[in-house]
Amino acid sequence: MRGDALLADSANLIAAVQALGSAVEKQGILPEPVAGVLAGHSLMAILLAGIQDAGRLDAVPPSALRRRLGSALTVGDADDTYVLPMLEKADAFFRFVQDRTHKAYVDAGADPIRVEVPSLRDAIASPPLYLDYYLNFVERLRENPQVASGLLQTAELTCFDALLGDDAWKADSFSHLFTTEHKGLLLVALKCLEVIAGNQVASPLHDIHDLPFRGSAGKVPDRREPSDQPTLFDPPGTTKRLGDA
């Protein structure tokens, strides 16, 4: 089986994160470390979805992607040709019955009363409010493919190393993953997570704002460098000995 066949579609990933946000809102505050772990995985899901859709923008215009995502997130099918037309027919039928009933009352001498009946199609088909923000994030990923290509690894090291107090992420071999550009996109992804799932889900990751991303995107990582070399985050002139942390 191909590897990409195991990856959920972007709409399914977004819907899962939204469902988590709804569940957390009903459940209440999550304890640690559960809150941090779920937040980290939710951020990874948003990034996976965004990278998928950024790749799709090479083949479809943003308006088409927006339409497909809106359909997938509302009726569950990006290429739906049945549900919305059926709802339109239902709306038309309700209007017909309402107009006929209204006319019968008026013909019987009653005063005309107009009651607005909500549209079933509009109630179902209205895209989620976060869709525009998410698509803005997708376009930012597409505009910077070099950074976007490594952003999943950046997020993994950030959520499950840096925010947990470890320092493996500071190694020179990872410096190309911690540039200011990486931090900028990661913070947009974090805001996207907050917009989709709510602040309670995203709050365990807010310390990302304070992490020092000072790597160099042009540096080629050398994972064979001797261990006595200082890391990117050590003060200038520092020399590390074997066995130093």
Image (cartoon, grey):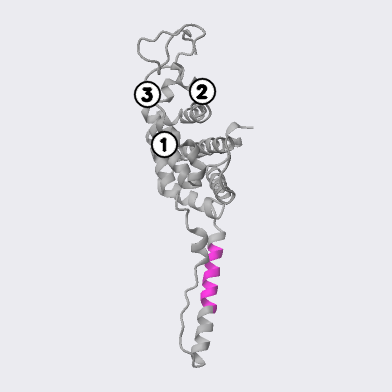
Q: Earlier in the sequence, mark 3 or mark 2?
A: 2
Image marks 3 and 2: residues in contact by CB distance under 8 Å? no
Q: Quadrant of residue 229?
A: top left
- Report the amino acid beneath label 1: Leu
Q: Earlier in the sequence, mark 1 or mark 3?
A: 1
Q: Nearer the viewer, residue 115 or 90?
A: 115
Q: Which residue is mark 1?
A: 187
Q: Earlier in the sequence, mark 1 or mark 2?
A: 2
Q: Which residues are magenta?
A: 85-97
Label 1 to label 3: alpha-carbon separation? 15 Å
In the rendering, at what x and y percent does residue 191 appear? 43, 42
Judged from the image, the secondary structure of the residue bearing numbered disc 3 is loop
Q: Which residue is mark 3?
A: 214
As drawn, the residue found furthest toward the right would be 1
Nearer the observer: mark 3 or 2; the answer is 2
Q: Which residue is mark 2?
A: 166
- Report the amino acid beneath label 2: Asp
Q: Is residue 88 magenta?
A: yes
Q: Nearer the viewer, residue 24 or 64?
A: 24
Judged from the image, the secondary structure of the residue bearing numbered disc 2 is loop
Label 3 to label 2: alpha-carbon separation? 17 Å
Q: Is residue 33 magenta?
A: no
